[in-house]
Each structure stands twice: as C-alpha cells, then as structure tokens.
Amino acid sequence: MKNQIIVFFILLLFSGCKIDSQTAIPQKELGFLGVKIDTLFVDDISIRAILIDANKVWYAANNGRFGAVDVTTNKQFNGYVTQDALALEFRSIAQTKDHIFLLNVGSPALLYRVSKDGSNIKKMYQENHEKVFYDSMQFWNNQEGIAMGDPTADCLSVLITRDGGTTWQKVPCENLPKVQTGEAAFAASNSNIAIVGEATWLFSGGKKARVFFSSDKGLTWNVVETPIVQGEAMTGIFTGTFYDEQNGFIAGGNYEKLNQNFGNKAITKNGGKSWKLIAEKMGFGYASCVQYVPNSTANQLVTVGASGLYYSSDRGKNWKMLHNDTTLHTIRFMNDSMAIAAGKNKMVKLTFTK
C-alpha cells in the first residue's frame, strides 16, 4: 500500500505539471511587464504601413514618402514618389525578395514597385474611379500577392498578381462575395489582410463587419458574419491578425467613439468560421492595429491605437496598458520581444520587458 501511495503522488505531480497550450500559459510565457520605447526618427509625417525586412523596417507614408531604417545601425533611407503633382498617400506596403510595393490609397490608385536599393521606382498599376480606395496589400510568396480596397461596384476591390508584381489584375465581382450597402474597409494600419500559408482573410467595416476567406490564395472566396460593432460608417473591423490557420483576432470599434470598449474585439479558434466577442467593457477602445507576439502559441497579443499600447497574455481575455501613447497607428514584431511601431510624426522601437 505504501508503494502504491508513492506511485499515486508521483503520477499526480506529473499530471499537475502538464500544460495545455490551448488553455493555459506556459511558465516561460507569463507575459510582459513593461515596454521600453526608443525613438528611431521624428518628422512631419503620417505612417500607417510598415513591414519588417531582416534588420530593416520599411515604411509607407503620406506626401508620396517611403523609406527604410536599419534598426541595428540606425542608417536611414528616405524616398519620394511624384506623380503629376498629386499628393500621394501610401497606406499599403508589401514586399518580395527584391522589391518593395507601395499603393496609393485614393483615386487614382497607383501601385509602385521599388527596388530594395531604392535605385528604381516603376508604376505597375493604375485605377481611376471616384470610389477607389485601397486599404491593404500583402504577398503570399515572391510571385503571388494581393491588395484589397473599398467597393467600386458590388464587391470589395481585390487586386492579384501571379508574376511577382509585374502585372496586377482586378478580380471580377462575379468571382467575389457581394458586399452589402455601406460595407467597405479601413486603411488604418495595413492589416485588413491576414495570410497564413495559402489561407487569406480580408476584414471589412462600416455598415457590416465581416471576414472574407480564401483557402486557395484568392481563387475562391466565402464570407462570415462577425459580432463586431457595425451599422454606421465609422464602425467595424479596422485590423485583424492570425497566429496560425486556426487562431485569429479582430479589433476595431467605433472611430467616432474612441473610448467605447465593447463590441470592438473578437476571437476565433476555428480559422474564422465563427467569431466570439471577448473582453467586453475591458481594456482598450478603438484600436487601429493588433498583432500576435511571435512564439507565444497564440496567447499573447499587442494593440496600438487611440487608447494607447495594450497587451494581453491570455488570448485577449484580459488587457493591460503598457504605454499611454495614443499616436501610434501600426505595429510589427521583429522577434518575440521587440517590435517597431509608427504613426503620427514618428517611428519607434519597442522592447518588451518581463
């Protein structure tokens, strides 16, 4: 009997130490306690789109401006695109191995390819329409990419390239789900598109807040309703992210009621087939960008926006403010403890501390 009792307690000990990554946070992921902010540059600029390229962070901005900062050396490259005296506003940026792509938000929609050494800038696509408004752009791989924007007809505007960005084709509305009246998207942080492998999610807002899904890199699509606040022009999903093909998070809210912290965040555990509101009347209000922390098994999330910099270590159930800067519009992680954020008049490096 004595030996049986010893065996029982040994088994109990080991079973008690087992951690299910879907329901608990491993000891090493107890979370961030704070954040250290270092300014990379300050300028008269508005940045809503950034991407990470090894040690560099590229940005797309207003007034035709774009550029890159090497985070290790602080060396900076600044570029400028002119087109018929237009004040271009780049809110979408994407990359392949050799090129950066910039997309002007309004009419005319102008998509440029820039060599990563900055020596060559070439216009690859132009669309003239009074309703044109492009919100986000990403690449699946070095050959295939997608951009999305507001409807000019009865579907979202979707551009796809299959030749590395040399040519872009607008997907006909008969090949896309129909939008509802007043449904569009927001160019808040270049995060209206999420890609994991061949799976792609597009996020809408306005009178409807829905998720458009393709499992085959934009060949076929379906659409799912979400419980995010909707019904008015400035409500809906402003940002979304997926950790893997199953775990995703969407956020946004009401841009005209920045402190409203309900109906503004939702989670999926089944690849976006269904969404559930989370942290109602808790944490941040309107958010312009949400991202998963890398290597966090979908447990850790960070948002920036009008409420400040917020962090969750438990899949979005609870949130804490790490910094009260309300001028950051977009954020991307370089690794699991450092991110780059940008917004009104600046770009900063965030080092998260435990």
Image: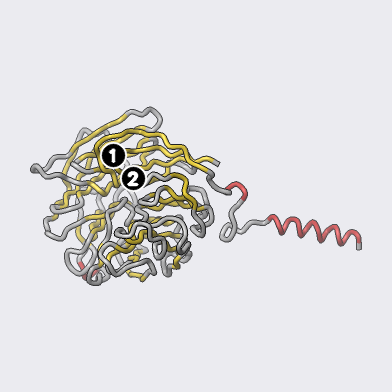
- Residue that badge 2 annotates: 327
**Quadrant the C terminus occupies:** top right
User: From the image, which quarter does the N terminus lie in?
Assistant: bottom right
- Disc 1 residue type? Asn
Q: Secondary structure at mark 2?
A: loop
Q: Looking at the picture, tell me which residue is in the foreground, 264 or 82.
A: 264
Residue placed at 58% from the left, 54% from the top? 25
Please say if 61 is above or below 150.
above
Instruction: Check the image and report above or below for 296 versus 175.
Output: above
260 with respect to 47 (left or right): right
Where does the image place residue 22, in percent across and percent down from the top left?
Answer: 56, 60
Q: Amino acid at mark 2?
A: Thr
Taking the spot 12% from the left edge, 59% from the top edge, the residue there is: 130
Q: Secondary structure at mark 1?
A: strand
The residue at 24%/48% (across/down) is 165
The front one of 84 and 218 is: 84
Q: CA distance from mark 1 to mark 2?
A: 9 Å
Q: Earlier in the sequence, mark 1 or mark 2?
A: 2
Q: Quadrant of residue 44?
A: top left
The reply to whether the C-beta atoms of the residues labelled 1 and 2 are less than 8 Å apart is yes
Q: Which residue is mark 1?
A: 345
- Image spot of residue 272 (x, y percent): 41, 65
Residues packed near mark 1 inside 10 Å, few (<14), some (14 to 19) or many (20 plus): some
- Image x and y of residue 69, in percent: 33, 34
